[in-house]
Amino acid sequence: MTDFLEPLRCPLCGGSLERAPGCLRCAAGHSYDLARAGYVNLLPPGKKNNAKTGDEKEMIRARSEFLRRGFYDPIDEALASLLAESGPASTDGGDRPFRVADMGAGEGTHSCRIAALLAENGKRRVDLYGFDASKHGAEAGCRLARSMGLLPKDGIAAPAEEWTSPVRAAILPGNIFRLPLADASMDAALSLFAPVPWDEAARILVPGGRLAVVSAGREHLGELRRILYDDVRLTDFHPAPPDDFRRLSLLGRRTLSFPVTLSSQAEIAALFMMTPFWHRVGDAGRERLAALDALDVTAEAEISLWEAVS
């Protein structure tokens, strides 16, 4: 099987990354130390406030608690089914797994689960590369990948022979608008509830590769919003690249809607903390929500599927 590190690139010079003791290093000498959780930080060095980039630790913890209870599993299942219907991965001598990049992976729950389902549904080996601005997300994601057997115990810098799982995955700090991946190296890309780097998606996908974009539907968490805000305005949002963008072609859109039953204040608080509302709502809305010990909400996601045009 090909080396998991093969498509990764140095965020400074774009060179290939090789293993060195306790780190990954490119031929130009740029070095990226292995963190205890198993990742290397591939955010471009020298950027102001990199240490504070991405979601806070509390939001990452809330998202982990919520997603790992399975509330949003239908989204993962829908995406895995869509991508499993794609053609087989282009291969190097028949040896290359199906490669997927998650652009905005958060704490990795969606990423790792979709990769595992994709391997199961498509009967293929899968390599998953998740990127997010949050180091806290990468830490949580790599711990999850380790617990699922998708990442060696020695982390991403582990020797190639330790990468024995048919599904291999790592979540790494990285700039989704400047992904540390080689051109035309991915068979599929994901963007879930995150800004979509259209140019980067087109760059990293092989011709005919698929981009799956998930955005909030019109009624997404409408019940929660009506508790938090006195005036709720529902709007339609359909992510799309600029009109003159010709490198990705829309294959179709679908809306996925399903109920979510929250049975405790802890579950309600976890959902609230992982949403943008956490930073925006006033005290009155917080007090109304804190008074509840159960809540039924509607999850509504719009899924659009795009194809990379050669």
Image (cartoon, helix red, strand yellow):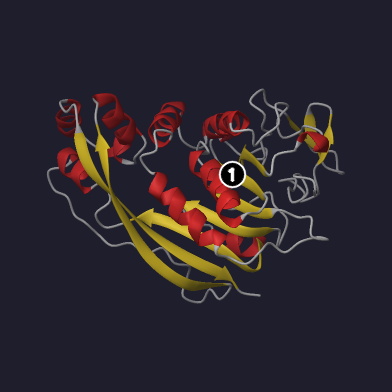
Question: In the visual, does 292 lie left or right of 255?
Answer: left
Q: Quadrant of residue 297?
A: top left
Residue marked by disc 1:
131
**Residue 146 falls in which quadrant of the image?**
top right
Residue 194 visible, this angle? no
- Could you tell me which residue is drawn at 68 percent across and 50 percent down? 125
Where is residue 112? Give x, y as percent.
55, 41
Residue located farthest toward the right when viewing the structure as drawn: 27
Residue 42 to residue 237: above or below: above
Height in image: 125 above or below 38?
Answer: below
Figure disc tally? 1
Query: Image quadrant for the C terminus?
Result: bottom right
Identify the amino acid type marked 1: Phe
Residue 281 x/y as whole percent: 24, 37
Judge left or right: residue 94 versus residue 136.
right
Picture quadrant of residue 149: top right
User: Helix, strand or loop at disc 1?
Assistant: strand
**x and y, in percent, of residue 274 in the image:** 37, 36
Residue at figure coordinates x 66%, y 32% from the top left: 39
**286 lies left or right of 158:** left
Q: Residues within 10 Å of mark 1 (few under 14, many from 20)?
A: many
Q: Nearer the viewer, residue 74 or 61?
A: 74
**Extreme residue toward the left, this view:** 230
Does residue 129 lie above or below 162 as drawn? below
Regarding residue 160, the answer to whether it shows in the image is: yes
Single out the residue that lies furthest toward the top.
Answer: 36
Q: Position of residue 275 (x, y in %)?
A: 34, 40
